[in-house]
Image: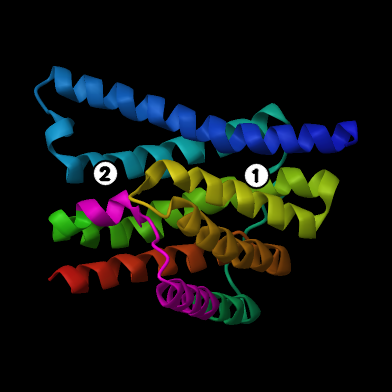
Amino acid sequence: MSSSRLQSASAAIGLTYGSYLVGNIVILLVVLVLGGIGINLMTRPSLRLLLSTVLLQGVTYGGIVIIYLKVRSLSPEFIPFSLPDKHDLIVIIVGIVALLGLLFAMSSVISYLGIESAENQAVEIGEQNPATLLLLILLSFLLVGPGEELLFRGLVQGALRESFGPTRAIVLASALFASIHLFSLSGDGKFVYIGIAFVLALVLGATYEHTDNIIVPSLIHGVYNAIQFALAYLAVT
């Protein structure tokens, strides 16, 4: 591997796992501070989940994007964004349908084969407190979709594209994106879940490269997550 590719791969890996580590340190510090004033989040999983979402996907991922651009003296155009035009809107609709269709197809195959898939801990907590799922629907649009897309498509895929080209960058960034979900899963079949996340991430990466607009995968991601939480809410209630 050439030195430029090694640097790009190292930057992508560092951004992926470093951001997650920093985010969890921030969450831990806030939990300790709140505990010191009498707010025990360890006994309030729903509140802890919502706070973690704000601090990780919102504060940490957004902050790291800004820091990375400043450290590398990159302009905001490194992650291109603009109001979606007619073509972008068509891609958004096709992307959402593609994600839901792929999820249905893969879930059907997994069910037919009798293979078990892990479950995201956010859904498990939401099943215990359905109101949490309603707030997660809102956060999917405001923080989760934009935050994760800025980091994984904007920075990680962007860093990999510099040396590997767009196609390989999509594949590698999708693999890193899927792998980070391992820490938020419970139950058996974690690698099945990661495999599904990898396939879905390929769609997000492709839409970003096709439109050259980070808003597009952000909206696709946000709507997809919101639909998942909405279905979970309906199932519970």
Camera-side residue of 208 and 66 = 208
Residue shown at 55% from the left, 65% from the top: 200
Residue shown at 51% from the left, 73% from the top: 99
What predominant SS class does the magenta segment belong to?
Answer: helix
Residue shown at 37% from the left, 55% from the top: 118
Point out the tag, 1 or 2, that comes first from the N-terminus: 2
Mark 1: secondary structure: helix
Q: Answer above or below: position of 3 versus 207.
A: above
Looking at the image, the residue that sits furthest to the front is: 114
Q: Quadrant of the N terminus?
A: top right
Mark 2: secondary structure: helix
Q: Mark 1 points at which residue?
A: 155
Q: Answer above or below: position of 16 versus 33.
A: below
Which span is picked out in magenta? 97-125
Q: In this view, does 231 lie to the left or right of 166?
A: left
Residue 30 position, x and y percent, is 28, 26
The amino acid sitting under disc 1 is: Leu
Residue 159 position, x and y percent, is 73, 43
- Quadrant of residue 42 within the rendered picture: top left
Residue 67 position, x and y percent, is 59, 31
Q: Mark 2 points at which residue?
A: 49
